[in-house]
Amino acid sequence: MSGLALLGLSALLGLGAGAPLCLSRQLRMQGDYVLGGLFPLGSAEDVGLSNRTQPNTTVCTRFSSLGLLWALAMKMAVEEINRGSTLLPGLRLGYDIFDTCSEPVVAMKPSLVFMARVGSCDIAAYCNYAQYQPRVLAVIGPHSTELALVTGKLFGFFLTPQVSYGASTDRLSDREAFPSFFRTVPSDRVQATAVAELLHRLRWNWVAAVGSDDEYGRQGLSLFSSLANARGICIAHEGLVPLPGAHGLRLGSVQGLLHQVNQSSVQVVVLFSSAWAARALFSYSIRSRLSPKVWVASEAWLTSDLVTTLPGMAQVGTVLGFLQQGAPMPDFPSYVRTCLALAADPAFCASLDSEQPGLEEQVVGPRCPQCDHISLENVSSGLLHHQTFAAYAAVYSVAQALHNTLLCNASGCPTQAPVRPWQLLESMYNLSFRVRGWPLRFDTSGNVDMSYDLKLWVWQNQTPKLHTVGGFNGRLTLQMSQMRWHTPRNMKPVSQCSRQCKEGQVRRVKGFHSCCYDCVDCKAGSYQRNADDLFCTQCDQDQWSPDRSLHCFPRRPKFLAWGEPAVLLLLALLGLALGLVLVALGLFIWHRDSPLVRASGGPRACFGLACLGLVCLSVLLLPGRPSRASCLAQQPLLHLPLTGCLSTLFLQAAAIFVESELPPSWADRLLGHLRGPQAWLTVLLAILVEAALCTWYLVAFPPEVVTDWGALPTEALVHCRVRSWVSFGLVHAANSVLASLCFLGTFLVHHQPGRYNGARGLTFAILVYFITWVSFVPIFANVHVAYQPAVQMGASLLCALGILATFHLPKCYLLLRQLESNTPEFFLGGDPAGSARGQGSSGGGEVTQQKQVAHDAVTSPQ
């Protein structure tokens, strides 16, 4: 190490004295297999290539320190492989490095030299190049996309492997157009994907996109535009920056673009540009005092000295971008210092002259004349540049492929036959190799899968330092706490055309950009499926959702459940009615021989009470989940018992009317039919008529169980649907006719003093019936379908209770409390002696003695 230090000291003293180096002569070394190298050692921007009139030699005037460092990385990799025993044991790699000047015109000459036959500078024309052996086995480089698109066609024709360490355009992934192209940097598609993901994560959907007017900028801008559109990111302004030319910079429409960005709400600019175009754009931006923005940089200018050293760059705003990761190379600065020290040693330089005659210099001229007049200070700023590793790894990829082609192992390479480029190319496809412990692999398109670091410019002493604030390896990670923004209080800038909609709101686009919109609430029955939806999605019919919902919920079935408060109340009413019916029926049966019971119809009165009990029990079919059987049975089991009850009341009313209003001769004959066994025929006939109507109703228009999805907001209503309201009305009409006849028969009669007024109870009973069912019609028609069973249940119970309370319960009271009134004279209209005659008339078991007795057996008229 002390000798190396002395060597470095002597080199620095030599440089300080102004002695030229022989660094350019270190760019070539002989070997068993030679690799060509294309590096931007200089620049021809001051030569004026647009004015060329002859295909003469182009001189590169400006030195590029990064290009030299990348070339030294290739040199370092070759020397490491030659010294080691893992790759190509017993073989020696050589290299031939030329300057491209970052110009396709300049890069074509060394490319042709590479493809010349070994030992000459000529390229012959053959029908078949399978046995053709060019000077180099593979090519490392070039760096830029513009050059790779040109050289890739040439090397692709010869099927010579070409491994670029910087060309990233996605076009080079086309295997048909560039069959021999590989690269140790990811495609621009990966970088554009990372940028789009970054904007999406930070909710910047209203951005400007600018690219340099070259293949790199146009392709990158096109990729980003398509990816941004897929992520819902709107490009408010878009433009290209022309490259600096011989006649100076012509920004053209970009000036207007920057002013539009400055005046709009756009706070983020994505700049996919080469370093020269980025420098020109920022120069104009600083001169014009444009407001600070967030600049999302592409890898080409994020670390470029052309941009970072521009005066006033600290005022442009926040700069962040993605930088390719790579294995650390801590020994590279030491290697560069050694190379510079050796280049200053005259003895070492003399040895290079004796070993390398320099045949190609007669054709291409000096390799890098500027490299012989530099110092360590000229290259110190780029010693740790991230793409140094990419150039270094490119050499290892070719060495690994050659190792596999020659079937090498730890003891040597058994295959010593010459390897031609197309044979090496077969081993390059899907090649896996390791570089300083990093596993790398070429995919089918020749790309490597490498991760990115998200870098942020942090200014220190007029120089930006790159701080890692995140990464991208197919998935974006951010360290928001490490972010430093140009805004007051370090607030994250907002770059949106419209505010972010809240949950449950969709965007109603206004104008031409999908990012400019109004927020509209999703109404009940619809929901917001995705955050970027433009329309609310309707729920399925078996689902529901509230306003501004993100999901739909299943509808629960709704019907009149047994546990609902209304049902419990109605069941209590049912218990009361049924209890009273049973009490009345029990009293009537117990006192069946009393004048009161005989005057009320005797057995027919008990039958009417039993029918009222069945009417009450019929309401039990209405609560609970409807079924086909319950739907069919509801109306018949209500109306048939009600008909039986009304028919007994009709016989009572008819008997009162006949006895009170007709002549005695007619009354005698009719009363025998109304009170004797023949009266049961009337009851049977009424029930048969009602049964016929119910049968027609069930057969012609059977009610059905339906599920109504739209009747209730959150539930599915399950109910019995009436298919024909006409038939439903006719079923009610038969009972209404009976009730009307009862009412007419009792309302018109005259009451006889001193006798029980039975017509009054019948009148009120029928009035209750009419009031109940007339009220039922509008209520049932207007109430919600969900509550119709409860309405029908209440109407049935009120009707039964009304008849019971107005007709039967007063008689029960007389049976219990006024036994002295329970006499034949009061109820049957005769003396005690004639009570037997009245009883026979009522029961039909004895012979009538007198006409008057039969007449007085009717309950007293009004």
Image (cartoon, rainbow, N blue to C red):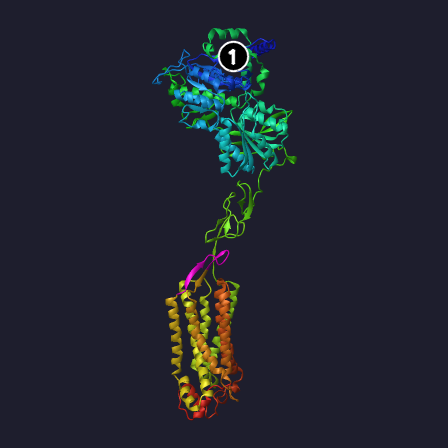
Q: Is residue 397 visible?
A: no
Give the quadrant of residue 383.
top right
Query: Relative to residue 525, is residue 697 drawn left or right?
Result: left
Magenta-colored span: 702-717
Q: Which residue is mark 1?
A: 24
| Mark 1: secondary structure | helix
Residue 155 found in image quarter: top left
Foreground pick, 409 / 260: 260
Where is residue 623 shown, x and y percent of the image? 47, 64
Q: Position of residue 154 (x, y in %)?
A: 42, 20
Does residue 716 show up magenta in the picture?
yes
- Give amino acid for label 1: Ser
Image coordinates for residue 122, horizontal then vertical, percent: 40, 13
Instruction: Name above or below for residue 459 compared with residue 640.
Output: above
What is the x, y in percent for residue 577?
50, 73
Residue 790 falls within the magenta-colored stretch: no
Q: Is residue 13 above or below residue 267?
A: above
Q: Residue at x 41, y 84 (%)?
A: 674
Q: Residues within 10 Å of mark 1 (few under 14, many from 20)?
A: some
Seen as rendered, the residue at the extreme left is 127
Observer-nearest of 417 and 257:
257
Quarter of the rendering occupied by the N terminus? top right
Q: Is residue 486 visible?
A: yes
